[in-house]
Amino acid sequence: MDSLITLKQILKTMVDAHTRLLDLAKGKRNMLVDGDIQGLQSQTHREALCVDEIQKLEQLRIKCVQGYMEHKGVKGESFTLEDVIKVDPDANTRDELTSMAIKLRTLIQEINQLNENNQKLIQTSLSYIQYSIGMFARKEPAIGYGPNAKNRYSNMLDAKI
């Protein structure tokens, strides 16, 4: 029973950590839109720390679930939270674990969606930067022979008005 109490505590901590990660991803979106590079670096560092914490919690969860399932006499190499829910006879515990699992899934989906949106923002910014650089940078010379194949460069700064 101690492993089940520990599992609940780990899951609550995981929900808190994922909530913090979601908040960081939301803040990151705002920084991307504002172009706050220093804030973005700081935010990315905090995200990395949060992800490290989540990974450690996941390892603890795996060990805890494994111990609980072995205590219940179920053999296997890896178990999910759903496996624990199926084995546990207490309805209140099953409901509590199910609720936490749903919260975690929802948070993870929101984080993934925000990360995809942030990635699109970054790609759009990079495309704009590449376009802007292309407008001002010298073009490669035309390759060829003959009088019309002079080194012809064109860019916005060389244009005659």
Image (spheres, grey):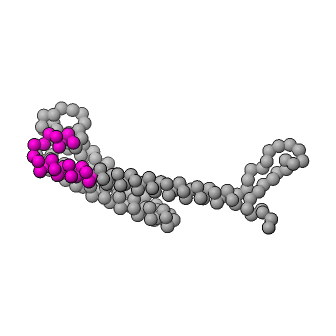
Relative depth, front residue between 52 and 159:
159
Residue 65 painted magenta = no
Residue 67 position within the rendered picture, expressed as x and y whole percent measured from the top left: 17, 40
Query: What secondary structure do most residues of the magenta stretch adopt?
Result: helix
Q: Is residue 68 left or right of residue 141?
A: left
Relative depth, front residue between 160 and 45:
160
Residue 87 painted magenta = yes
Q: Residue furthest top?
A: 75
**Segment colored magenta:** 82-104
Residue at left offset 30%, top offset 56%: 17
Mark count: 0
Relative depth, front residue between 129 and 94:
94
Residue 74 in view of the camera: yes
Residue at left offset 40%, top offset 64%: 27
Residue at left offset 87%, top offset 48%: 148
Residue 143 position within the rendered picture, expressed as x and y whole percent measured from the top left: 80, 44
Residue at left offset 55%, top offset 58%: 125
Q: Residue furthest right?
A: 147
Residue 158 position within the rendered picture, expressed as x and y whole percent measured from the top left: 77, 62
Residue 10 in view of the camera: no
Residue 36 position within the rendered picture, expressed as x and y whole percent measured from the top left: 49, 66
Q: Quadrant of residue 159?
A: bottom right
- Quarter of the figure with the C terminus: bottom right
